[in-house]
């Protein structure tokens, strides 16, 4: 151990691992040191996986890992390994899948028991220190698992074999034919029936935002004009924007709501949720002009700028990248930072308190454990501008007072994939809302990742305080390629496009499955894990194979190079058979198939800053265009020879647009309204 007061985790960079450096548990980080110790002692490994913002991870840490008695039992019977699931998603996904194969509900903290060869034989999630909630006490579990490993080798070997076989099968893709738009429409109809018709969201409690699914349904509405699709997404977003899952003082959305009404959040805030929801808010505002969506988008970016700018050193200058998350807990209580007593609001707002309390449903008894979660669930939209301005002033007073409270824990590591999601969303939102400052944020973050999260031409997954760690995953490359193309289309600069092309080469060289198609989650020259996973299923974040299929489709349309079309078709085909088994987690792949087949390629010949070109670009911003592939060419610039608009010219020296679908292009267009009409057609 490092010292009498610290264990090995004191050497780590992850805020989550550092939370456990003072535990009496003799923790190891994941790595050869732990596995060799387990093999020498012939002890099983206790693998504990969590993340810094996780409430139940804190609970189990306080109850068990800080207990001298339980820690002594852990140290005697096991080699104990701590993993930050955000820092090592490759490890987490394997053992979460193993737990699911056991028929158990996954989640965090993840508690798995492994052989010294890292093979799982049993597991669970949170265990209390003594028997409760219908779960055995953690000490009982420890003793039972140690005994099973020592005395029941046959059953342990049986479990290990069955789980390894199951993990291998689940990593095998289900190939199929190209996903058609008829299939996409049928799938959207099936999914739309699962939405709560009164409160929005899928199913009952708990309710998750599920932005990939919402994007799929919104695309279906734009494709078909079917009203139920539009209503399902708009109702869900309205309820989230007005419910307690949204932070009405500071901006930003919590990870999920524990109830069906979107009132009670699981208070942690994640960068990835807010990136994807910013994208959705942008789309919905463009198509509806509802000021609610614009306000929530602006407030969410305000939260990002105020609270989520990662630093080069503790308390130092911003590095340019975005931090990962804010904790659910402060002062040992979930949600304490965010909730209010009526008396606090009366004291702070005085004569204006009554107006605020009516607007935000503040009552003497509260709406959660005797306190109030601010919400406007009774309002389906914003009030009159004068009333909103008054409420904004009052919110500012409460936000200023809230800033004096003990803040939730901040996980300030920079993750490549989550930053990719936010960079892309910021770039698209900046264009839609006319906010060049947001574009600056996105470009600075992209430059940071390229400069400081890259080693020897290869991306790293995580960075904190000057240290980049862990080889990048497929998701890192995929979301950053998408971000690069978003920046290229918004700015016209060639550098992001060149970077995306370079990253695609890395993926093809080190991640592509030459036998069965699709991209593996990890590279072929990184640490060998129990199984090399490959999936297309969206989770809280979009699946890397779905994202990269969309990137490849967009690259084909941008460059005219057929190899990108072939590779996009190969990715989609490698997993298309899944539509016959489980359509729920396939949104991103289905959206990529639509982009590949239905893209509207718009080429504008003219200067972006000149009046004619600016007017054409402004027209494109008036509606969301999920399938738009945009290129703006100034003097001396030309399209690749394989592009359908190659050789087209401007009309009388005026900015001119062409709308191409497949290899067919429209007549030249100089009028902004005609451009929108051509896109609608």
Image (cartoon, rainbow, N blue to C red):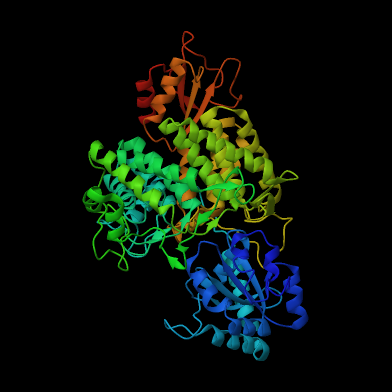
Which residue is located at x 45 percent, y 62 percent? 328
Pick the quarter of the image with the N terminus: bottom right
Q: Is residue 82 left or right of residue 31?
A: left
Q: Is residue 584 positioned above or below 505 on the image?
A: below
Q: Is residue 154 positioned above or below 239 on the image?
A: below
Q: Is residue 654 positioned above or below 489 on the image?
A: above
In the image, 267 versus 453, the foreground residue is 267
In the image, 209 versus 448, the foreground residue is 448
How many numbered callouts?
0
Which residue is located at x 61 percent, y 69 percent? 20
Q: Is residue 43 left or right of residue 380?
A: right
Q: Residue furthest bottom?
A: 151
Location of residue 519 in the rendering, given as x and y in whole percent from the top left corner = 62, 52
Q: Residue furthest top?
A: 652
Which residue is located at x 64 percent, y 68 percent? 21
Location of residue 554 in the rendering, given as x and y in whole percent from the top left corner = 54, 37
Pick the quarter of the image with the C terminus: top left
Q: Is residue 607 visible?
A: yes
In the image, 162 versus 311, the foreground residue is 311
Q: Is residue 179 visible?
A: no
Q: Is residue 170 positioned above or below 459 on the image?
A: below
- Residue 338 found in image quarter: bottom left
Location of residue 641 in the rendering, given as x and y in whole percent from the top left corner = 61, 24
Q: Is residue 672 left or right of residue 46?
A: left
Q: Is residue 552 left or right of residue 594?
A: right
Location of residue 479 in the rendering, given as x and y in whole percent from the top left corner = 56, 46
């Amino acid at each position: 151990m490092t010292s009498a007061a610290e264990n090995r985790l004191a050497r780590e960079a992850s805020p989550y691992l550092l939370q456990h450096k003072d535990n009496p548990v003799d923790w190891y980080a994941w790595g050869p040191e732990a596995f060799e110790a387990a093999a020498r002692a012939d002890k099983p490994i206790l693998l504990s996986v969590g993340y810094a913002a996780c409430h139940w991870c804190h609970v189990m840490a306080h109850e068990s890992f800080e207990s001298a008695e339980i820690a002594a039992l852990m140290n005697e019977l096991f080699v104990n390994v701590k993993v930050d699931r955000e820092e090592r998603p490759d490890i987490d996904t394997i053992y979460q899948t193993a737990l699911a194969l056991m028929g158990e509900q996954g989640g965090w903290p993840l508690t798995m028991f492994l052989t010294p060869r890292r093979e799982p034989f049993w597991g669970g999630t949170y265990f209390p220190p003594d028997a409760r909630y219908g779960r055995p006490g953690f000490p009982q579990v420890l003793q039972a698992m140690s005994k099973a490993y020592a005395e029941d080798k046959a059953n342990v070997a049986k479990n290990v074999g069955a789980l390894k076989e199951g993990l291998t099968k689940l990593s095998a893709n289900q190939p199929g034919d190209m996903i058609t738009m008829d299939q996409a429409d049928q799938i959207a109809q099936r999914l739309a029936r699962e939405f709560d018709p009164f409160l929005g969201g899928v199913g009952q409690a708990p309710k998750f935002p599920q932005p990939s699914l919402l994007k799929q349904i919104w695309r279906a509405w734009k494709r078909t004009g079917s009203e139920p699709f539009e209503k399902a997404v708009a109702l869900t977003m309205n309820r989230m924007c007005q419910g307690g899952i949204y932070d009405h003082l500071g901006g930003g959305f919590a990870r999920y709501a524990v109830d069906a009404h979107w009132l009670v959040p699981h208070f942690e805030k994640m960068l990835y949720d807010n990136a994807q929801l910013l994208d959705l808010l942008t789309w919905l505002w463009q198509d509806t002009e509802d000021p609610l969506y614009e306000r929530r988008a602006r407030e969410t970016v305000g939260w990002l700028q105020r609270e989520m700018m990662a630093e080069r050193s503790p308390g130092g200058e911003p590095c340019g990248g975005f931090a990962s998350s804010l904790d659910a807990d402060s002062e040992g209580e979930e949600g304490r930072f965010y909730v209010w007593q009526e008396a606090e609001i009366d004291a702070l707002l005085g004569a204006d308190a009554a107006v605020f309390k009516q607007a935000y449903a503040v009552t003497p008894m509260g709406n959660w454990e005797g306190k109030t979660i601010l919400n406007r669930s009774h309002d389906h939209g914003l009030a009159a501008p004068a009333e909103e301005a008054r409420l904004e002033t009052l919110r500012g007073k409460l936000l200023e007072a809230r800033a004096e409270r003990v803040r939730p824990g901040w996980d300030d590591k920079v993750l490549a994939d989550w930053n990719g999601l936010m960079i892309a969303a910021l770039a698209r939102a900046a264009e839609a809302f006319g906010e060049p400052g947001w574009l600056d944020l996105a470009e600075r973050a992209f430059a940071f990742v390229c400069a400081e999260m890259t080693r020897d031409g290869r991306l790293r997954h995580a960075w904190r305080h000057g240290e980049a760690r862990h080889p990048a995953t497929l998701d890192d490359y995929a979301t950053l390629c998408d971000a690069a193309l978003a920046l290229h289309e918004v700015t016209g600069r060639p550098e992001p496009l060149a970077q995306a092309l370079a990253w695609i080469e890395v993926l093809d060289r080190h991640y592509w499955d030459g036998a069965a198609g699709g991209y593996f989650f990890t590279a072929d020259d990184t640490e060998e894990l129990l199984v090399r996973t490959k999936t297309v299923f969206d989770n809280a974040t979009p699946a890397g194979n779905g994202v990269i299929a969309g990137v490849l489709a967009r690259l084909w349309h941008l460059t005219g190079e057929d190899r990108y079309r072939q590779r996009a078709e190969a990715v989609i085909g490698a997993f298309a058979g899944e539509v016959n088994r489980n359509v729920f987690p396939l949104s991103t792949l289905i959206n990529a198939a639509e982009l590949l087949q239905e893209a509207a390629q718009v080429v504008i010949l003219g200067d972006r800053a000149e009046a004619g070109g600016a007017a054409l670009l402004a027209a494109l911003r008036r509606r969301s265009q999920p399938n738009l592939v945009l290129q703006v060419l100034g003097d001396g610039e030309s399209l690749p020879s394989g592009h359908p608009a190659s050789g087209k010219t401007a009309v009388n020296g005026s900015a001119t647009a062409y709308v191409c679908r497949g290899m067919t292009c429209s007549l030249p267009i100089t009028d902004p309204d005609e451009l929108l009409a051509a896109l609608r057609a």
